[in-house]
Amino acid sequence: AGMAAAAGGELWRERQRAADIARVLALYRPLLDAYVVEFFAEDLWAQLPPSWQAALAAAPAPQLAARLLEPPGTSAGTGAGTGAAAVWPLSLLAFRATAQALAFPRHRHRPRRQRSGPAEFRHNRSQSAALHPLLRKHVKPKKQHEIRRLGKVVKRLSEAAGCDRVVDVGSGQGHLSRVLAFGLGLPVSAVEADGRLVQAAERFDRELLRALRKAHARCARCAATPARARPPPCSATAPPWASCGARLSPGARPGARPRSRPPTCPRGPPGTPG
C-alpha cells in the first residue's frame, strides 16, 4: 500500500509539472516561436518588456550566460554586490526561477541493476539483441536503440489512431523505415531530400531484399522443412515482400514463416526515394 501511494504521489507530481509547463509555454509562446534569423526582420527585441531590455542590454554576454544558468537560490541573480544597474526586474527573475524549477533533470536515473547498460546490449555492446540481424546492418548501436524504441512508439500510435500508412519524413538512410516495414509490419512511405542519403537507402534496401530472397530460397530447398512451413515461392512479377517478406523479429530466421501479413509496400520498390 505504501509503495502504491508513493507511486501515485509521483504520478500526481509529474502531471502537475506537465500542467505547469503547458501554462508557462502558453504565456511565453511569442518568445518560443521566434527564430533567430527573424531577430532583425521582425524586431524581436522590441517584443521583450522594457524592463527586460534594460537589464539584458546592460549585461555582457559572459555575465548574462552565467546569471541565466546559475543555480537557484544564489544571490548573484539579484545583482547583490554588482551595482544597482545590474539588478534584474522581478518578472525576469521569476521567469528564470520558473524555467529552472520546471526543467527536466539533465541526467538519467539508472537503477543499479541496469548499470551495465541496456539489456539489449548486454551480450554484445555493438549489436542490439532486440533487432533482427538484417535490420542491424549498417546501423550504429545508438541508432539501433533509437529506432527500436521509436518504432514501438509509432506502432502503438498507428494502432490507436487507426492509421493505415506511416510517412517517414526525413528518412535519411531508411533505417527506421525498414524497422517499421520489415520488423513491425507497417506500410511505410519514406521521404528524403538529400540525394546521397536516398542512394544509400536504396542500396540498403536492395541488400535486405537480396538477403530475404536468399534466405527463402535456402528454406525452400531444405528437405527437412515441412511443406506447410515453407513460404510460397517468390513471384517474378510481384514485389519481393508481397510473397517472400516475413516480419524480421529478433529471434526469427529470415526464411521462417511470417507470423503476420507482411507489409504490402515497406518503403516502395528499390529506386523509390527514401
Image: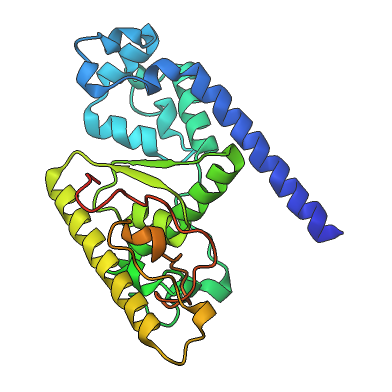
Relative image position of residue 48 (x, y in whole percent) = 36, 12
Vertical placement of 222 versus 125: above or below? Answer: below
Residue 11 is situated, as x and y percent measured from the top left of the image, at 70, 46
Residue 97 in the image, given as x and y percentages of width and height: 50, 31
- For the residue pair 15 and 161, the one nearer the viewer reads as 161
Is residue 73 visible to us here? Answer: no
Is 23 placed above or below 184 here?
above
Q: Quadrant of residue 241?
A: bottom left
Indicate left or right for 217 with 113 as reference.
Answer: left
Q: 2 or 128, which is in the foreground?
A: 128
Horizontal side, residue 118 vs residue 58: left or right: right
Question: Where is residue 254, by image quadrant?
Answer: bottom left
Residue at point 23%, 46% (across, down): 272
Horizontal and vertical percent for residue 171?
A: 29, 46
Q: Residue at x 43, y 68 (%)?
A: 248
Q: Residue at x 74, y 53 (%)?
A: 7
Quadrant where the N terminus is found in the figure:
bottom right
Relative vertical location of residue 72 with respect to residue 83 in this rendering, above or below? below
In the image, what residue occupies the spot 45% across and 52% down?
A: 150
Horizontal side, residue 160 vs residue 133: left or right = right
